[in-house]
Image (cartoon, helix red, strand yellow):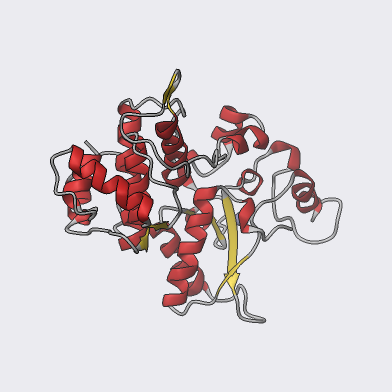
């Protein structure tokens, strides 16, 4: 079954790679196990202990879409030490805690069937019930992940690129916000209150990923968020998630940035956009995206 991380929700892919970084730093030998599971693969598992030998491992047949793995929002992990993949409780507790610090849900917290090797995007709760209700099939859900790939289109500034259905730049920013922080926006290219809130969520998400700030990614800018931002800044040449947030925030204000990456790479397109934005908003146009610029961008 699939250990292919690229079949996971884009935001979960980001979390996996951040978790791998954290575990490397902490000398935890993290192995990534199963990621996406097809209907047929889920049926195979369901057969185990029923029509096939072995112990029962799941109560969910494939057609029920009841496993988070079938929605691309979960992955399993193990201890990458031969012969000792599952016998170290503290390993699972520590990785589970790091996963939660990155905003994921952990199966070790489940009360019904505890599932310690399991981490997931908790946006839709601890079961796929909401996803089933909202999207019906995985294919419909998968469509909401799609990046149009046009975010990299250079040129255009705050005033340009307005189409009949809102701005193309804002629309792409909304899609990136959905992927990066689960903003759940309609990609309509119109900057309304939900889009504005999504910008705050992107910044909170970035601070959790970069600084392990442990903020609720709720789009509400309060004292904890302000404290986490501190005097942090990013500028040309840097690579971190705060750069991703700067890219998304600028796009949500209709500034083209020359692409969005996760973690973000502060290139010349973003440098130009930051300076332009600063100049047009009474800020010192120095290309440093720091607290003043971020506070302006979320406003
Ligand atoms: Zn699992």
Pick the quarter of the image with the N terminus: bottom right
Pick the quarter of the image with the C terminus: top left
Give coordinates of residue 64: x percent, y percent: 70, 37
Q: Quick one: 175 or 255, which is closer to the camera?
A: 255
Asked if residue 235 can be seen in this view, the reply is yes
Residue at (45, 34) in percent of width and height: 184
Q: Quick one: 178 or 54, which is closer to the camera?
A: 178
Q: Is residue 231 left or right of residue 76?
A: left
Q: Is residue 4 left or right of residue 172?
A: right
Q: Is residue 248 above or below residue 95?
A: above
Q: Quick one: 191 or 169, which is closer to the camera?
A: 169
Q: Is residue 144 left or right of residue 204?
A: right
Residue at (22, 49) in percent of width and height: 225
Residue at (42, 47) in percent of width and height: 258
Which quarter is ligand 1 in?
bottom right
Which of the 4 image quarters holds residue 160? top left
Q: Is residue 10 above or below residue 252?
A: below
Q: Is residue 278 left or right of residue 47?
A: left
Give coordinates of residue 281: x percent, y percent: 17, 38
């Amino acid at each position: 079954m699939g250990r292919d991380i690229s079949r996971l929700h884009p935001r979960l892919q980001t979390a996996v790679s951040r978790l791998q970084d954290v575990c490397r730093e902490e000398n935890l030998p993290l192995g990534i196990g199963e990621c996406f599971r097809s209907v047929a693969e889920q049926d195979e598992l369901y057969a185990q202990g029923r029509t096939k030998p072995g112990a029962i491992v799941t109560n969910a047949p494939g057609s029920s879409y009841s496993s988070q793995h079938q929605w691309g929002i979960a992955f399993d992990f193990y201890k990458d030490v031969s012969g000792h993949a599952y016998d170290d409780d503290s390993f699972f507790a520590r990785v589970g805690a790091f996963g939660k610090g990155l905003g994921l849900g952990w199966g070790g917290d489940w009360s019904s069937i505890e599932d310690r090797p399991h981490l997931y995007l908790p946006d839709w709760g601890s079961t796929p019930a909401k996803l089933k209700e909202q999207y019906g099939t995985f294919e419909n859900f998968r469509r909401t992940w799609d990046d149009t790939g046009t975010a990299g289109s250079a040129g255009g500034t705050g005033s340009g690129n307005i189409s009949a259905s809102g701005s193309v730049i804002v629309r792409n920013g909304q899609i990136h916000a959905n992927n990066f922080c689960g903003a759940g926006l309609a990609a309509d290219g119109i900057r309304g209150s939900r889009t504005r809130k999504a910008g705050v969520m992107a910044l909170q998400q970035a601070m959790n990923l970069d600084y392990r700030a442990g903020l609720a990614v709720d789009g509400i800018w309060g004292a904890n968020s302000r404290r986490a931002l501190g005097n942090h800044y990013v500028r040309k040449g840097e690579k971190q998630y705060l750069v991703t947030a700067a890219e998304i925030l600028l796009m949500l204000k209709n500034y083209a940035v020359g692409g969005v990456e996760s973690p973000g790479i502060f290139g010349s397109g973003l440098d130009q956009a930051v300076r332009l934005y600063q100049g047009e908003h009474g800020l010192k146009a120095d290309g440093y995206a720091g607290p003043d610029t971020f506070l302006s961008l979320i406003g």
